[in-house]
Image (cartoon, rainbow, N blue to C red):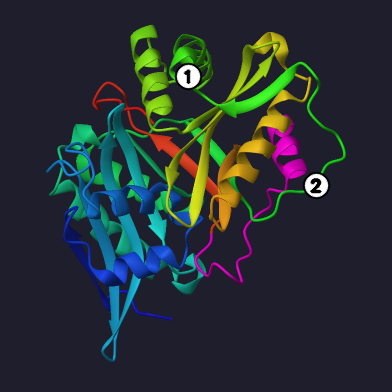
Amino acid sequence: MPSAQEFSVLSFGAKSCPKEVIQALEANPADANVILPFLKKSLEGGSSTMCSSDQVWLSCVSRNNGIVTVDMVLSCTENEMGKYPIFIVPTQPVSRWSPQSLSVRLKALAEALRDSVPQERVYSIFAPEIVVSLFSQLWSDLVGIGINEKPYYAARLLSCANVIPTPSSLPPSATCRLAVTADTTAIAKLCKGFSDESEPFVLGRTEAFKEASLLISKQQVWVYCVSEEITCIAAFTRNTSNMATITKVYTRPSCRGRGYARHLVREVTRHLLRSGRREVVLYVAHNNVSAAHVYESVGFVEPDPAVEVGHSVKWTEVGFDRNYVDLGHW
């Protein structure tokens, strides 16, 4: 077990990511879904938003007898829809460290983040439960901004490498397909509905239309239609050549309980795997039992920790006092 002192924190920009960091994230693709796709697009020459100087990456690196080990990676980034939470991805099992070793690493990351961005930029933290618990308190102590009592989000991370076959087929009047420009208004309404149920990240109609337009232009959203009417959407916005992340599934309230989301998630997952990805991942809230049943029936399970050595199942987003931070969106 490494001591509390055998590490350093490195800061890097979009074009200067150390190869060790990329390799560590690639070895844990499920957990790294919140960082790796964005980082790769930036390295490959992403949009001006991706390459903005406001983007910050930090890595905690241990050195032992000349061997470099990346312990965890933190990102502070944004896209066209707004600023992301602070993401922290351990790339080694958290159990590898004593409480003191983990705490001093997270404190060093918090201090480096404080020196890199305005404190109002840090509106929330999304990471494995133990990391969020420690880091949020360390950050609050550093900058004097209180922690919200109730987490914004608490979920399990699930992965699918093989879709479970099903004997049932789509009803005659139903279709699953990639969304097209003509679907923008209908999809915007569902994006708005999704955000209305995702307090505090609520979109206005203009922002929802913008999100729908972006999803369609990037070919990152599918629709489930009944008699040509869109009733359900599934979006996948954090993707690499080997992994995709389903980030939004939403069914119109009047159409729930009819299996539409199950059909759509199955078709989207099958499409993503057939396109060459090794796995598709998603988060499901602990209190969303019906969604968990849908995903598990498709073939989503908790990733195998024997394969992904740094894997964490339970993830949490904790926010800070909104009177002192600038809320983003994701």
Is 13 displayed left or right of 138 in the figure? left
The picture places residue 172, in percent across and down from the top left corner, at 80, 19
Residue where numbered disc 2 is placed: 165
Q: Residues within 10 Å of mark 2 (few under 14, many from 20)?
A: few
Q: Is residue 165 visible?
A: yes
Amino acid tagged 1: Ser
Helix, strand or loop at mark 2 = loop
Residue at left 45%, top 39%? Answer: 317
Amino acid tagged 2: Pro
- Residue 23, located in which quarter of the rendered image? bottom left
Instruction: Give me the disc on residue 66.
Output: none
Secondary structure that dominates the magenta span: loop
**Is 300 one of the magenta-colored residues?**
yes
Of 82 and 221, which appears nearest the observer? Answer: 221
Residue where numbered disc 1 is placed: 195
Of 295 and 127, which appears nearest the observer? Answer: 295
Q: Which residues are magenta?
A: 286-311
The picture places residue 205, in percent across and down from the top left corner, at 39, 7
Q: Residues within 10 Å of mark 1 (few under 14, many from 20)?
A: many
The picture places residue 27, in percent across and down from the top left corner, at 45, 68
Residue at left 15%, top 41%? Answer: 52
